[in-house]
């Protein structure tokens, strides 16, 4: 695989043209395999993301005794074992780079009769887990974290969980989902309120698996003791992966790309609103639904962008898209101001620092604050970018390179395979100048 090369060289290429199929949604793929594993009966997942993160989750369920077949790439047939059918693994469960995998599993495994240990890679091992372990402890779970509340998570099974009425201190779909999964194993009702609505895939998909769950934006409630009924899941294309191409085509003159059947769950499309505020030319065509999720082709054409103050209300709906937004802002007319986005400091890397430092390396002025930044646009130059083993930082700078007047070398690109295997081939195919020199 070309992504085994350890760096990319990006430079200004041609106008971007073509029709692209973006791989399956990461959030949906994680949940599909988890819920199918817990269901009674056999479920087929189509469009499963063949990324390292989601494969780690599937491998964990195999270690927990679930039979999962891969008849063709992007398809999984999951032979569910029922909510009480998982069995102890013979050692630590490796979530790889995936915060979603680890946090959701923490909730799910807290309700089992057996002990489990969750570990992750160097990046995941630095990420905060108390946001899940503290409310799970309130439900009666026993989970030990490493120093500073980081992984590994040692989960003691056999605890009697009880429901909780919990208001999340930070908007987090991962925390909400962990508590709902623990809630399935709890006595009584679990009720969650969010400071701002976050992606509701857990709620929608539990309902599709036959769970009686009440939810509306910002709220979710379920009773413990319910079973899941197998169902087939069609995973839409991942908006967060599409985001790099939305920005790239917007900033490279003469570009026009069609991104096929991209998932447009309203809790994911904040970047679409932000780019349109900036003047981007993006239209939605062939709208339909795919596995209960709204999808449409996104047609994006180059357009001059202007800097904006990103509305704080959009932040949770574009939390994974800020690296891409920073690149759009770098190529706009006038500064772009981001506030209320402190969560970016605890993603796969400190994304505020990574993007600010990287854009400075390429010659721009970026003023960083505790929870945001002001990006002053200008001509991007060549330079060496440390992506800090963060997939979205690496892909964002490959986009920035398309507007640079020199070569942008992007180091530490292997983690791109966690969310977007084949990104570089797809990018080259539509006109990116992006080399993957042999390591
Ligand atoms: C995710 C939720 C978000 C997002 C992550 C995937 C999910 O994290 O950043 O990439 O699938 O629930 P938070 O819920 O922690 O903000």
Image (cartoon, helix red, strand yellow):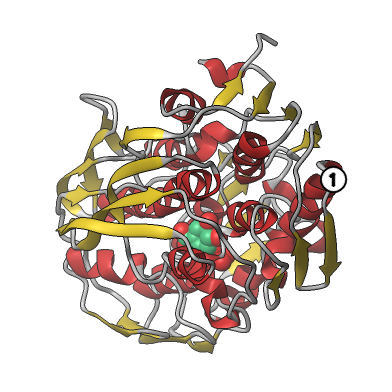
Q: Quadrant of residue 329?
A: bottom right
Q: Name the quadrant of the C terminus.
A: top right
Q: Quadrant of residue 281?
A: bottom left
Single out the residue that lies furthest toward the top. Answer: 438
Which residue occupies 32% across, 47% down? 237
Q: Nearer the viewer, residue 427 or 110?
A: 427
Which residue occupies 23% across, 47% down? 80
Which residue occupies 65% across, 77% down? 309
Query: x, y (%) of residue 349?
Result: 72, 50
Query: x, y (%) of residue 55?
Result: 43, 35
Q: Does residue 87 appear left or right of residue 143 in this picture? A: left
Q: Is residue 37 above or below residue 370?
A: above
Mark 1 element type: loop
Q: Is residue 303 above or below residue 341?
A: above
Q: Nearer the viewer, residue 242 or 51?
A: 242
Instruction: Report if the beta carbon of the residue with label 1 is closer than 8 angstroms to ligand 1.
Output: no
Q: Which residue is mark 1?
A: 363
Q: Nearer the viewer, residue 374 or 214?
A: 374
Query: x, y (%) of residue 243?
Result: 47, 51
Q: Is residue 404 visible?
A: yes
Which residue occupies 70% across, 76% down? 339
Q: Does residue 394 appear left or right of residue 427 in this picture? A: right
Q: Residues within 10 Å of mark 1 (few under 14, many from 20)?
A: some
Tally of numbered tags: 1
Q: Nearer the viewer, residue 4 or 383?
A: 383
Q: Is residue 83 visible?
A: no
Query: x, y (%) of residue 37?
Result: 29, 48
Q: Does residue 48 appear left or right of residue 395 in this picture? A: left
């Amino acid at each position: 695989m070309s992504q085994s090369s350890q760096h990319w060289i990006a430079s200004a290429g041609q106008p971007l043209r073509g029709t692209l199929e973006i791989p399956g949604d990461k959030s949906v793929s994680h949940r599909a395999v988890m819920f199918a594993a817990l269901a009674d009966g056999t479920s087929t997942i189509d469009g499963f993301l063949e990324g390292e993160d989601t494969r780690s989750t599937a491998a964990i369920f195999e270690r927990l005794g679930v039979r999962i077949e891969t008849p063709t790439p992007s398809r999984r047939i999951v032979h569910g074992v029922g909510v009480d059918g998982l069995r102890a693994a013979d050692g630590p469960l490796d979530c790889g780079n995936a915060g979603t995998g680890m946090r959701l599993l923490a909730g799910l495994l807290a309700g089992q009769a057996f002990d489990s240990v969750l570990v992750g890679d160097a990046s995941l091992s630095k990420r905060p887990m108390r946001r899940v372990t503290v409310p799970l402890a309130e439900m009666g779970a026993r989970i030990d974290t490493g120093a500073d509340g980081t992984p590994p998570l040692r989960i003691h099974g056999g605890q009697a969980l009880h429901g909780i009425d919990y208001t999340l201190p930070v908007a987090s779909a991962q925390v909400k989902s962990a508590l709902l999964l623990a809630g399935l194993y709890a006595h009584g009702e679990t009720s969650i309120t969010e400071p701002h609505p976050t992606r509701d895939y857990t709620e929608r998909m539990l309902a599709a698996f036959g769970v009686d769950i009440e939810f509306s934006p910002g709220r979710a409630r379920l009773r413990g003791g319910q079973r899941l009924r197998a169902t087939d899941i069609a995973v839409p294309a991942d908006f967060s992966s599409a985001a790099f191409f939305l920005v790239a085509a917007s900033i490279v003159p003469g570009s026009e790309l069609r991104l096929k059947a991209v998932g447009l769950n309203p809790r994911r499309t904040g970047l679409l609103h932000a780019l349109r505020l900036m003047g981007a030319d993006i239209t939605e065509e062939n709208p339909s639904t795919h596995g209960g999720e709204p999808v449409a082709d996104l047609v994006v054409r180059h357009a001059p962008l202007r800097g904006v103050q990103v509305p704080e209300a959009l932040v949770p709906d574009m939390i994974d898209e800020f690296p891409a937004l920073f690149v759009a802002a770098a190529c706009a007319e006038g500064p772009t101001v981001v506030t209320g986005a402190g969560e970016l400091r605890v993603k796969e890397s400190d994304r505020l620092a990574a993007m600010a430092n990287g854009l400075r390396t390429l010659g721009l002025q970026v003023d960083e604050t505790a929870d945001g930044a002001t990006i002053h646009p200008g001509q991007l130059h060549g330079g060496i970018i440390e992506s800090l083993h963060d997939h979205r930082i690496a892909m964002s700078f490959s986009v920035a390179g398309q507007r640079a007047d020199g070569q942008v070398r992007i180091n530490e690109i292997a983690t791109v395979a966690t969310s977007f295997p084949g990104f570089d081939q797809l990018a080259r195919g539509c006109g990116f100048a992006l080399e993957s020199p042999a390591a």
